[in-house]
Image (cartoon, grey):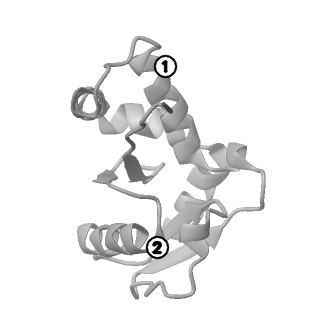
């Protein structure tokens, strides 16, 4: 008998200059769930234009997506996760979770949520604040 696996996906966005963030737990990595995330992201940050850096995951490329007016999707080149600031956050989160993971999905979700709550905006800014993004942010503000 093959093992049965359970999954969930954590969608996230962090503003590298301020550390403001949005995380949303979703049951799948597909265009429907990504649409929910886009809509929540748009509602959470209604002022100005919000650039969302993304990889080339199929859910991010779906033609059926309705991108809110205050969101700009910026797709990074293929095979370049090092350019996406949120990837450093996922690496840090994995480090804090460690290798001794809970045996059930509910406990894992709780542990992830608890760990995410420990990240302050300053910490998120220090993890995701790539120099080129911070310079671009302040150039836009001046």
**Mark found first going from the N terminus, 2 or 1:** 2
Residue nearest the observer in this picture, 117 or 8: 8
Measure the alpha-carbon separation of dots 2 and 1. Answer: 28 Å
Residue sticking out furthest to the front: 1
- Residue 140 location, x and y as percent? 55, 69
Residue nearest the observer in this picture, 12 or 140: 12
Structural crowding at the residue carrying mark 1, measured as other residues with C-alpha within 10 Å and reported as few (<14), some (14–19) or many (≥20): few
Residue nearest the observer in this picture, 36 or 116: 36
Q: Say which mark, if any, is on residue 31.
A: 2
- Residue 55 location, x and y as percent? 64, 59
Residue of label 1: 95
Above or below: residue 51 compared with residue 68:
above
Identify the residue at horizontal 56%, vertical 79% (top origin): 62
Q: Is residue 110 left or right of residue 100?
A: left
Identify the residue at horizontal 22%, vertical 33% (top origin): 106
- Residue 130 location, x and y as percent? 61, 44
- Residue 25 location, x and y as percent? 30, 51
Identify the residue at horizontal 41%, vertical 37% (top origin): 124
Residue nearest the observer in this picture, 6 or 20: 6
Structural crowding at the residue carrying mark 2, measured as other residues with C-alpha within 10 Å and reported as few (<14), some (14–19) or many (≥20): some
Q: Is residue 39 left or right of residue 70?
A: left
The secondary structure type at the circle numbered 2 is helix
């Amino acid at each position: 008998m093959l093992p049965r696996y359970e999954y969930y996906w954590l969608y996230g966005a962090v503003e590298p200059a301020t550390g403001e963030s949005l995380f949303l737990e979703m049951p799948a990595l597909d265009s429907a769930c990504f649409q929910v995330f886009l809509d929540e992201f748009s509602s959470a940050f209604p002022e100005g234009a919000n650039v969302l850096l993304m990889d080339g995951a199929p859910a991010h490329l779906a033609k059926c997506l309705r991108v809110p007016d205050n969101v700009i999707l910026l797709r990074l080149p293929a095979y370049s996760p090092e350019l996406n600031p949120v990837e450093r956050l996922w690496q840090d989160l994995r480090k804090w979770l460690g290798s001794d993971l809970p045996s059930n999905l509910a406990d894992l979700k709780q542990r992830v949520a608890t760990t995410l709550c420990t990240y302050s905006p300053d910490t998120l800014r220090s993890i995701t604040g790539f120099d080129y993004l911070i310079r671009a942010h302040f150039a836009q503000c001046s």
